[in-house]
Amino acid sequence: MNDSAPKKDMEMAPLPGADDANFDLRQFAWEDWVAFALFWGLTLVVFLQFFTRYVLNDSLAWTEEIARYLLIMVAFIGGGMAVRRMSHIHVEFFYVYLSKRTAFILSTVVDVIRAAFFAYSTYLGWRVTEIMQFQRMVVIEWPMSIVYGAAFLGLGIMTLRSIQVAIVNWRSGESALTRVTTEGRLQ
């Protein structure tokens, strides 16, 4: 067989992160594992809903409601992971045209506003969780404060992680936003 022959369409490049030698579980924090477990719980509930509805033709009443609540929990707990990894969306356009000092000052303002927003949201999440302790879920007689408590927990994680990110940015003198001028816009 000729080595210079073009590769067939059937051959695929390895998946990103498929290199087992460089894989490290320490890159994951505890909230990653909680979100992972909630996601798999959501997967099982949705599969159970599909199976009972379309295979058994007798849908379980509680699966749709629980799936909705698990999705909410995954979103809020996973938000902490996104804040820690700085993977939330950013508006990078202006940072390309700003001086490094101005970009860092603006980035610091963004860090402060983000932390304050998450802190206030956490406070509001706590207030709503307290109020909702007497409200029951529709199908299952559990308090809605479970769902709102998960949102409160996720917002608290986002607050702490945004403070950690801000401290790292302040100590290093740069952030993901200020690196846009040297790395280019990530599109």
Image: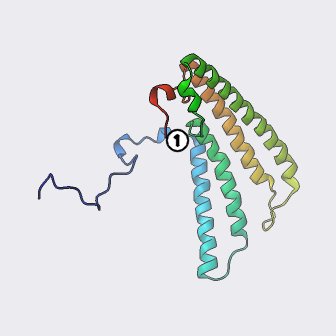
Q: Quadrant of residue 175?
A: top right
- Residue type at tag 1: Phe
Residue 142: x percent and y percent? 80, 60
Farthest left residue in view: 1
Image height of 2 relative to 185, above or below: below
Farthest front residue in view: 97
- Identify the residue shown where x is 59% and y is 29%: 94
Mark 1, other Cα within 10 Å: few <14 / some 14–19 / many ≥20: few
Image height of 109 relative to 187, above or below: above
Location of mark 1 (residue): 28
Q: Is residue 132 left or right of residue 73?
A: right
Please state which of residues 29 and 80 is positioned toward the viewer in this rendering. 80
On the question of residue 175 being in view, the answer is no
Q: Is residue 89 left or right of residue 159?
A: left
Farthest top residue in view: 101
Q: How is the image coloured?
A: rainbow
Residue 135: x percent and y percent? 86, 57
- Identify the residue shown where x is 66% and y is 56%: 71
Please state which of residues 28 and 155 is positioned toward the viewer in this rendering. 155
Image height of 114 relative to 6, above or below: above
Q: Quadrant of residue 90?
A: top right
Residue 99: x percent and y percent? 55, 18
The quarter of the rendered structure image containing the N terminus is bottom left
Farthest bottom residue in view: 57
Q: Is residue 34 left or right of residue 135?
A: left
- Identify the residue shown where x is 60% and y is 29%: 165
On the question of residue 126 being in view, the answer is yes
- Element assignment for label 1: loop
Counting labels gives 1
Residue 21: x percent and y percent? 34, 42
Q: Quadrant of residue 89?
A: top right
